[in-house]
Amino acid sequence: MERPRVTTKPSDETPVILWFRRDLRLADNPALNNAADTGRAIVPVYILDEAGDGRPLGAASKWWLDKSLRALDAALQQRGSRLILRRGDSESELRRLIDETGATTVFMNRRFEPDAWAQDAEIAHSLKDDGVECRGTNGTLLARPGSVLNGSSQPYRVFTPFHKALMAQAEVPTHTLGPRAISTPDHLSSDSIDDWGLHPKRPDWSAEFEGEPGEAGALAALSHFLKSGLGGYGAGRDIPSRAATSRLSAALHWGEISPWRAVAAARGAASDGRVPGAEAEKFVSEIGWREFSAHLLHHFPFITERAFRPEYDTMPWRDDPKSLKAWQTGQTGYPIVDAGMRQLWRTGYMHNRVRMVVASFLIKHLLIDWREGEAWFWDTLVDADLASNVQNWQWVAGSGADAAPYFRIFNPIAQGEKFDAEGRYVRRWVPEIARLPDKYIHAPWTAPREILAGAGLRLGQDYPRPIVDHAEGRARALAALKAIDNKS
Ligand code: FAD
């Protein structure tokens, strides 16, 4: 692709470019702070680079991004600036902006996924040849990948020592609000976000999507969580019918809030005596899993495609489009699985406990390749995150770093009975079985005929019978997994 050359000569009056990517916020934003420190005008830009940004965005991510960019623009406007939107090849668009403004510095918070990392490095080298400096900072993780290594200078492969080392060295930067006023040249053109078509049309399937994208929404979610979730987080986080988790995942993915702000807020609540310290640390350790995932992907880029433990790539996966479709659409006959898949489809979110159950069901009961599930999640989750998604799918598959042992096969009936004992979660998402008594809510096919009739449920018509028998599915998976485990 032909790229416009940089022609404008720098002068003291030239603005600097602030390239927003996965840091869609003004507070705690190192790239913005550095740009502001120059004392020059700032050109805040977001470039939609569908071909060059690594894996193309899923549909639910686009929905979130649409609103997050609008929120960022509104926040910038409050400070006298605005967000310039450009679409196309990142380097070409940056060069156009450089040409239009004469900027000689681009400030950006780095992205650490392998493709994005490589793209950033390429752009930085290329612009340097034309006298433009790219100044990268870490605005998305507690610690830069590569900085948390074990005693042999190798990446950690096990979570607990990683987290310990991360906590020992991660510095929590001072909270900053960003400049109160941002001056931006007014002659620059911007795309209209409406023309980007990120929000679905015909049909608009997002009516029930949840969350408030943008920095203000992230802070509101954090504040709500500190008051009503964090105090009982350790146990509450496993109950899918309760709103006991932070719901910060999409905000953290898009950088609407920094991870260090979330950590500092949780620890602050503990040190003020508002919540027990152990609850705050449990939450911090989940943020630690996000870091672990990002660091693993950075060090082992192949894990998006292949098993971290290579012997798992010999799994005898089944090609079974009908079962895959039943799983995707929440028609497996296992209420907890179907509830999770329907929650995902309708809201763009699924509770973590249920993510583990549905992933295990696909991989183990159906023996369908984890990559199929990962791809589906990528398209449908508003918090789709390459590192976290891949790491968690491989964790459930048993093929990842620090993964669950191969013989751990979630029992979808027992999981439902344990974590949704009164069936509140499944009744909400699978209303056709709502009138079954609690005793049968997680295994409708075990209900006597008269109970089914009393609940107005015709199995096989109103709601499917199980697409695979639990004991048979489990035995088949165990046999396949045992064979693999013997090879390792
Ligand atoms: P909270 O319980 O409030 O946790 C706080 C934060 O910690 C989260 O916002 C998230 O950033 C991080 N976190 C929590 N659990 C994990 C975890 N297991 N791994 C990595 N980070 C974690 N999370 C994503 O952000 N994007 C994904 O694409 C994603 N895919 C997943 C796929 C599978 C199969 C599974 C089992 C989990 C996946 N997760 C993913 C992790 C987890 O389910 C979500 O982060 C969590 O449910 C988000 O809800 P929350 O913000 O209320 O979490």
Image (cartoon, rainbow, N blue to C red):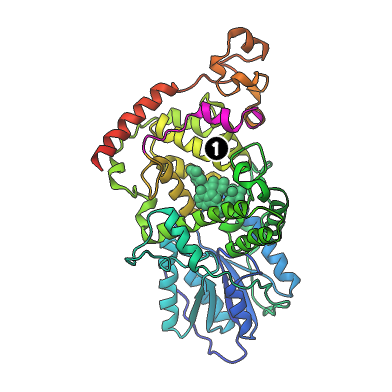
Quarter of the image where the N terminus is located: bottom left
Highlighted range, magenta: 406-425
Q: Position of residue 233 (x, y in %)?
A: 63, 47
Quarter of the image where the C terminus is located: top left
Vertical relation: 194 (above or below) 40: above
Task: Return the residue found at the far right.
Answer: 78
Disc 1 under 8 Å from ligand 1? The reply is no
Task: Return the residue found at the far left.
Answer: 487
Residue displayed at 41% across by 83% down: 129
Q: Is residue 382 visible?
A: no
Is residue 398 highlighted in magenta?
A: no
Is residue 415 highlighted in magenta?
A: yes
Vertical relation: 127 (above or below) 283: below
Indicate the quadrant where residue 266 lies.
Answer: bottom right
Q: Position of residue 213 (x, y in %)?
A: 66, 55
Viewer-proximal residue, 89 or 472? 472
Q: Position of residue 272 (x, y in %)?
A: 71, 61
Task: Return the residue found at the far top.
Answer: 450
Q: Position of residue 200 (x, y in %)?
A: 62, 47
Residue displayed at 44% across by 28% down: 322
Indicate the quadrant where residue 239 lies.
Answer: top right
Residue highlighted by disc 1: 354
Type of the residue with mark 1: Val
Q: Is residue 182 visible?
A: yes
Viewer-proximal residue, 417 or 295? 417
Q: What kind of element bears circle 1?
A: helix
Give the tally of numbered discs: 1
Vertical relation: 313 (above or below) 326: below
Viewer-proximal residue, 89 or 349? 349
Position of residue 450 in the picture relative to residue 477 (left or right): right
